Image: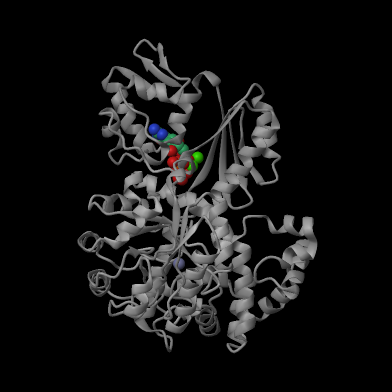
Amino acid sequence: MFYEIADMLEIEDEKRIFEIRAYRKAALSLETMQEDVEEVFRKNGIEGLREISGVGEGLAKKIIEYIETGRMKKYEEYKKKYPIDFAGLTQIQTLGARKAFRLYKSLGIRNVDDLKKAIADHRIMELEGFGQKSEAELRKGLELIESGGGRMLLGTALPEAEAIIGKLKGSGLASRVELAGSCRRRRETVGDLDILVTSEVPGKVMDFVAGLGEVESVTLKGPTKTTVRLKIGLSCDIRVLERKSFGAGMQYFIGSKDHNVKVRQIAIKRGYKLNEYGLFDMEDRIIAAEDEETIYEKLGMQMPEPEMRENRGEIELALEHRLPRLVQLSDIRGDLHVHTLHSDGNNTLEEMVGEAGRRGLEYVGITDHSKSEYVARGMDEARFQKYSKEIDDFNEKSGSKVKVLKSAETDILKDGSLDFSNKALDEMDYVLASIHTSLNMSKDEMTKRVIKCMESGRMNIFAHPTDRLINERAPIQLDLDKVFEAARENNVVMEIDSFPNRLDLNDENIFRARKYGLKFSVDTDSHRTGHMDLLKYGVWTAKRGWLTREDVINTMPLVKLRRFFKG
Ligand code: DGT
Ligand code: CA
Ligand code: CA
Ligand code: ZN
């Protein structure tokens, strides 16, 4: 609602920029909060709400109004004036609130369905100020959100799954509870949740699930499988399995389907049969069923971690007992992409470093934005000097065990140059570079832009290389093979950005980049202390791209990492 109020305010009067920003900032805080806002209010009242970054007294009152009545007067007033589904429409990359309003004024378009029809009838290209090109862009944008196909971000689905699993475990009704499916494989988006349990009282488990606070409705309720629709807009399958075949069930329901099909073929070749009840010989005698690893073992294989089970070659390696030892969360020693109040972060340097220390990290690279990123309050040279000094002072005087590396998220400008003077770049321990502007360049131009920057020899890490936002924004056009080639030539490290809606590079591109012998950095891109919790998503994505500890530079101790950057 806050996002939409901001959109409507913007239409009404662009100049009320502070108010507009306040709504957006609060919305972003609410969206990325780990706790439930309603719970925060119940526990700590209005004071609790006011502690949320960007939420002042006025906005806190609106939140309370919504919690208590389910409505927000201000929102409804505006909505009467602008009966437009902004949230839906502005998911489209090239469609902002003002443009959406113009479409409403001239064509009566209120939502995505209306827009689809207008595009199909070519009514948009005839509009003044729109034309053929913007119609094509809108069509592309529409396709993009539709290809998301209702899949939900792992970052949204997993905490929900974990909450349900926690309640099931606490119920005392189930002896084992395990997550399966794409969520267990840590795919970046999931179609539905799959939870497996063993229980002496399956009927009671199903009743318990149907009565959970997370559940909106029950789709199907049977003695061994129940499917429920969750309030967050996701479906969830709960299966009760027999203890003696739980391992076979895990193997089957963790998937993926492609992985399973291949494993089953191997079973057949060896004269066995494999299904969700077990591994059997031709006389239907059980070979293995209770334990997942034993099933793989009897097939002459190692057991791949769930993140690898996509039939991308892991089965062949497992048969040769040559599976790589994948990087783990505990291998990560530092975070090389962190923002502070110097640009668009919400915490001080001390707070961010303190949080990193509590999480057992040994070093943090601070990377506030450069000036071209003006919406994020990027730093010019003068502000960089102050920032630089603050970091030096911190390292000298704070006595902190966690060391700070000096960097900046430096824009790669249109012409491939970096957005800081060489003098500033020289002061940095490493340069984290990324693209934030002119995202619509052609593939050829964009590729040249990036390669030129890499060839300057000043760029160390390419942050969120394709700049895609899952279900939101398509990747920039890049010839990745050429970029990876240039990265290898110029020792540029590829970043895996842990934000659940970024996870960029994605698993497939990591897999591809790995073959070029590239190194990676798994970073959080934290803008507040709580974001440091997201590191696991980056590590899972790295695992899905088959990375080992040696592939990831921020598993190195600080001394070694410094040497690496110098080299
Ligand atoms: P999703 O839900 O689209 O994100 O992806 P999954 O992998 O969670 O797929 P889902 O929920 O349809 O099924 C869960 C697992 O069950 C899947 O990973 C593998 C197994 N499975 C489902 N259907 C089949 C099938 O037809 N054949 C085989 N071998 N396994 C299947
Ligand atoms: Ca699933
Ligand atoms: Ca399922
Ligand atoms: Zn950043």
Foreground of the two, 482 or 441:
482
The answer to whether residue 101 is above or below residue 481 is: below
Answer left or right for 320 relative to 125: left
Which quadrant, please, contains the C terminus?
bottom left
Q: Position of residue 502 (x, y in %)?
A: 44, 60
63 displayed left or right of 130: right
Q: Nearer the viewer, residue 174 or 87?
A: 174
Pinpoint residue 47: horizontal percent, then vertical percent. Answer: 77, 65
Number of numbered callouts drawn: 0
Identity of the residue drawn at 62% across and 55% down: 34
Q: Quadrant of residue 367?
A: bottom left
Colouring: one colour
Residue nearer the viewer, 433 or 276: 433
Question: As rendered, which of 218 and 465 lies closer to the eye?
Answer: 465
User: Would you say 164 lies left or right of 426 here?
Assistant: right
User: Does residue 439 show up?
Assistant: no
In the figure, 345 relative to 208: above or below? Answer: below
Q: Is residue 514 left or right of residue 281?
A: left
Q: Which residue does the image show at 27% across and 32% down from the upper left?
A: 322
Position of 474 relative to 319 (above/below): below
The quarter of the image holding the N terminus is bottom right
Vertical side of 162 occupied by 482: above or below: below
Residue 497 rendering spot, x and y as whole percentages: 42, 58
Q: Position of residue 210 (x, y in %)?
A: 68, 38
- Which corner quadrant of the image does residue 565 belong to? bottom left
Q: Is residue 497 visible?
A: yes
